[in-house]
Structures are given as C-alpha cells and as structure tokens.
Amino acid sequence: MTRKPQRRTSAIVAAAVVAIVAIVGGFVAWSFISRPSGAAETAGAYLAALERGDGVAASALSAPQAAGETAVEFGALDDATEWISAARVETITEAGTDATATATFTLAATQHSVTMTLSNRSGAWLVTDAPATTLRATSTMGAGIEIGDVAVPFDDAAAAGADAATAAGTGTETETKAATHAATVALLPGVYEVTAAPAGLLEGAQEVVATGAESLNVALQPTLGAAALTAADAQLATYLAACTAPATAVPLDCGIRVPWAADLASLTRLTFRIDKAPTLALAPDGSGFAATGGTLVATAVGVDDGGGAASFTYRDSEWALRGSVGFTIDALTLEVW
C-alpha cells in the first residue's frame, strides 16, 4: 500500500489560506479606500446615492437613528418615481467632529436647498440628520400605506391626533373626511406614489414630492379595486365550503337554518348541496359585505318521533350571509356576523 504525499496537500491548504486572507484583506482595504474620507466627500457621496436612488448606500452613510424619531424609510427611495438631479454640496462647515453642509438639487423641475449635519465621532463621517420629509398620511380604508415595496402600518396614536385636529377645527375639509386612520413616515428627497395598503386591492394612489425641507400631509380616499372583489369571492367560497361540510349540528355563523326539530326527535347527520351560491357585494366604503340570493338544500338524517330512522330535505332559496370587511397590510378579510 502506498501513502499519498502529505507535503503537497499541506502546500495546497496553505496556498488556499493565503488566498483567502488576501481576498479578505483586499476587501477590507477596498472598504477603507472607498469610504469617503472627509465631511464634504461624505455629503457628496450621500447626494450621489440619492441621485441614483440607492437607499442602501444612503443608509450606509447615515448614523443610527435616535429612538423616538420618525424612521427614515431608505428602502422607499428605490421605488421613487423620480430621483433628484444636479445635486451639489454648496457649503461645508466643520467644527471638530461635527459638520454642517448645505446642498442644492433639482426635483420635479424645481431647484431645492437642504441642510444636513454630519458627525465623525465613530472614526468615519456619517450623516446624522438626513434631509428627509416627514409624511403624514390619513386614509378612509386599509391597514396602512404603501410606497413601492415599503409598507407602513397605521399608527393609532397618529389617527387619534388626526381626529383631535378635526374636532378642534384645525383639519382641512379633505382631512376631516379621511381622518379615520393615519401613518407617519420620513422620506428622502424624491417623488413618490402613496397608496393605502393593501395596494393590490385598493386603488387611488396620490403623488407626493418630498424635498427634505418640510413636512407633508396627504389624505387618501381609496376605492375597492376589482382585485378586492376577486379576493373576497375566493375567501367566501372557502368559507361556504366549510359551512356546507357534513355535520351533526347546524353550523353557526353560516346563515343556515334547518328546522329539523319539526320532523325529527333527534339528529344524526346533516348534508348540504349548494344549488346556487350567494352573490357577494362589498360596501363601497369597505365597511362590510352582503352575500345574498343563494339556494341551499339540506338533508337531515335522524330518528323520528316513532323511534324509526328518517330523513327530511329542506330548501332555502334566500340563503344569505352578511358581515364586516377587514384589512391587513397584504390581504382583505371577511368576518361573518
């Protein structure tokens, strides 16, 4: 039996280790070389990230946000319908580890000016106060708002504030009608489409221009799209199938009435046949639904008053269900009363 040379194997392993170290070292070196070296360079790199819609790069150049602040949704920048252009740092003022930069850019055919602060307390210059616009959106329907792939759930506290403003007479007429739910988000400069969530089921997006210099209010009044009825129909069909499965008692919350006690002393089994499914209609404001005009045939099997086995068939030509409509960020839900 011959033994494989160990020296060659060791050499290969050593070479692989050296290669890995070289790659890691090169990556680390590249990271340090590519990171902006000064406050002006960092501010410029930040603006460049906004120009190309790179929310990941903008986030990497930003200091962690303080607790309690309205979170900047860096991911929304990727889905903006327009990004800034012709951006430039106009002035930079440094004071030790802190700096303030003023910048200009063009957005929606208008030139804008913003101020951003930077800090170098961690060994690298980072933007500590991003030029972001705080957007407060109210809506009459849905579970939140969507901006591209970013979903922001409604904030009950914000909704309460909207209602308080309306009660005090400080809300606009549009806001008064729409201040049932509210969400707050901070957006980097750009043009965005905002819609109520779930966006695939609700229609009525509004465009907002976030300049980074002021707050915005938008009142959404969405409508139910065709996809909402399709989704509700599928959910109702699943519900009706469960309601009409063979049972030993009349199912609850199904709109089913079977007067078997008039003919049987005891019930052994119920079976159902749907001759016509109820037709579903959603309330325009998304508050509820009605499924009416169905025809259901029920067969009851049991023991009659004489103690013998018996079965009776009942037909309901006005089978109907009613209930409320609810929303999650990505779906519609029906709840039968």
Image (cartoon, rainbow, N blue to C red):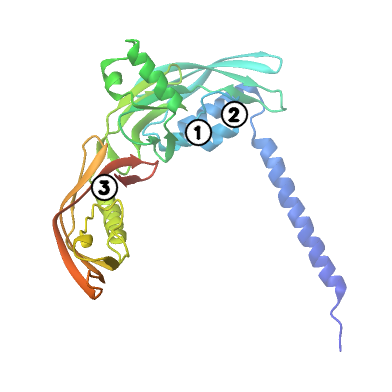
The x and y percentages for residue 333 are: 33, 46
Amino acid type assigned to the residue bearing label 3 in the image:
Ala
The crowding category of the residue bearing disc 2, from other C-alpha atoms within 10 Å (few below 14, some 14 to 19, many at least 20), is some
Q: Which residue is mark 2?
A: 62
Q: CA distance from mark 1 to mark 3?
A: 29 Å
The residues bearing labels 2 and 3 have C-alpha atoms spaced at a distance of 39 Å
Residue furthest front in the image:
306
Which amino acid, mark 2? Answer: Ser
Query: Where, quadrant-wise, is the C terminus in this rendering?
Result: top left
- How far from the left and from the top, in percent, is residue 33? 68, 36
Tell me the element at label 2: loop
Q: At 35% from the left edge and 40% from the top edge, which residue is drawn?
A: 327
Q: Nearer the viewer, residue 288 or 17?
A: 288
The kind of residue on which mark 1 rests is Phe
Q: Residue 239's image quarter?
A: bottom left
Query: Would residue 291 be found to the left or right of residue 4 on screen?
Result: left
Callout count: 3
Number of the label disc, if any, that sits on residue 33 = none
Residue 228 image offset from top left, x and y in percent: 27, 45
**Disc 2 to disc 1: CB gap under 8 Å:** yes
Q: Give the camera-side residue of 142 and 56.
A: 142
Numbered badge on residue 227: 3
Ranked by sequence position, the earlier of labels 2 and 1 is 2
Within the image, what quadrant is residue 250 found in? bottom left
Q: Residue at point 79% right, 66% down? A: 12
User: Pointer 1: what residue?
Assistant: 74
Q: Are marks 2 and 3 in contact (CB under 8 Å)?
A: no
